Image (cartoon, coloured by chain):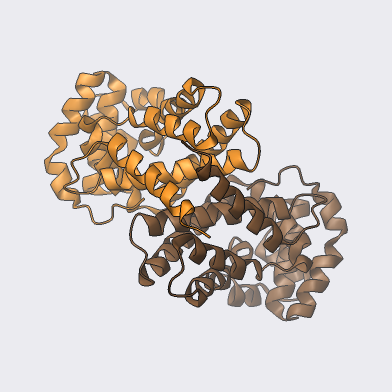
Chain colours: A orange, B brown
Amino acid sequence: MSATDINVHEHVSRCHHYTSWMSRWKPGARERLQAAALELYATRGFEQTTTAEIAEAVGLTERTFFRHFADKREVLFFGQEQFLRAFLDGVDAAPADASPLEFIAAAIESATSFFPDERRPYSRLRQSVIDRNPALQERELHKLAGLATNVADALRARGVTEPAATLAAESGATVFGIAFAQWIRDGEQRSLATIASEVLRELQNLTRSAR
Amino acid sequence: MSATDINVHEHVSRCHHYTSWMSRWKPGARERLQAAALELYATRGFEQTTTAEIAEAVGLTERTFFRHFADKREVLFFGQEQFLRAFLDGVDAAPADASPLEFIAAAIESATSFFPDERRPYSRLRQSVIDRNPALQERELHKLAGLATNVADALRARGVTEPAATLAAESGATVFGIAFAQWIRDGEQRSLATIASEVLRELQNLTRSAR
């Protein structure tokens, strides 16, 4: 999942897109802090931004910042629990006789609803910040690995055996990651759900073509 | 890939196994430092061990330690370039008409030669140290992600298109990871190559069972 080719300044100039999306979504202090933090990370650099500056940018105190986020890194990872929940809801909602890959297709479809097209500018900007900071990249990978572990648990709870459960969960994370990277590419117009189902089909072709 | 259930003390008592393997392999200062570091990390904890203590344990100076390793974390990740090379050699050696999954099977087979059964006690101990330290886990994930990126590059160089190249490379890393976790499980006797080819077969079954 790489977006190093993204022109940050171009995205910053489109900030009103994600800001308006975020404020329509739920215009609380948390969302204003999140939008301000992302803009500062993108323009000034993650390391160069302080929590005091983020709070000040939206007229709040640093104390308020820390009521919402443990540290400035957490601003970028907030909401991942809901993202995980969307995956697991998909597994839970699949029919009892689903194959491992059908469970995964259901999980991915559910998770894509977490990223409506309105959110694309925000996701692009977030990724460009993460791509420029190795420590943030490591954290992102750690979160994605945790996602696969949790999905594998959910698959086992629905009767999928090992190693199929782990293989399916990891493959699902891979498919989602590839689709997401494509979704935030400059000029991409298709929805995340459309891209994800194409990548999933490609995974099936891949393994079918083997001897 | 988890080995938190491993009894560290049990492994430490078997230290002569990996130490003798390492010294037969190439009995230089680097290998002695590596064996001593791993033993200290396992018994005392990674955070609690200093580079001076590692050097002292094998009668060398801290200066010598830093001639071989950038820091105490690098001791655990040294050799990963050769590991990556083994994967890439497998891709390079596969026939021109190989399918994406056949390239991956060749890469995995080549990489498993990097882990002969003699190395199993060392690999178990290393994993137990990494599993107990979140920062080391993040580093490990980062290295594995880099592996998949490099293998995808090699597949594209051999004519595999996207997203098949990235899907195949990521699936290969997943298969290897699952096989490796099984290989270091207590009581496991099969070779890594045997386990890996079974997991690869399971991946093919997984997608075949889908509608």
Q: Quadrant of residue B74?
A: bottom right
In front: B26, or A179? Answer: A179
Q: What x and y, as percent, mark residue B123?
A: 71, 60
In front: B156, or A8? Answer: B156
Q: What x and y, as percent, mark residue B136?
A: 58, 52
Left or right position of A67 against B178: left
In front: B121, or B114? Answer: B114
Q: What x and y, as percent, mark residue B1?
A: 63, 48
Residue at (16%, 47%) from the top-left corner?
Answer: A187
How many numbered dots are placed on residues in this image? 0
Q: What x and y, as percent, mark residue A104?
A: 47, 35
In the displayed structure, B8 sits above or below A66; it is: below
Does the rendering let one see residue B41? no
Left or right position of B181 against B7: left
In front: B196, or A26? Answer: B196
In the displayed structure, B98 sits above or below A88; it is: below
Left or right position of B180 against B19: left
Does the rendering let one see residue B21? yes
Q: Quadrant of residue A157?
A: top right
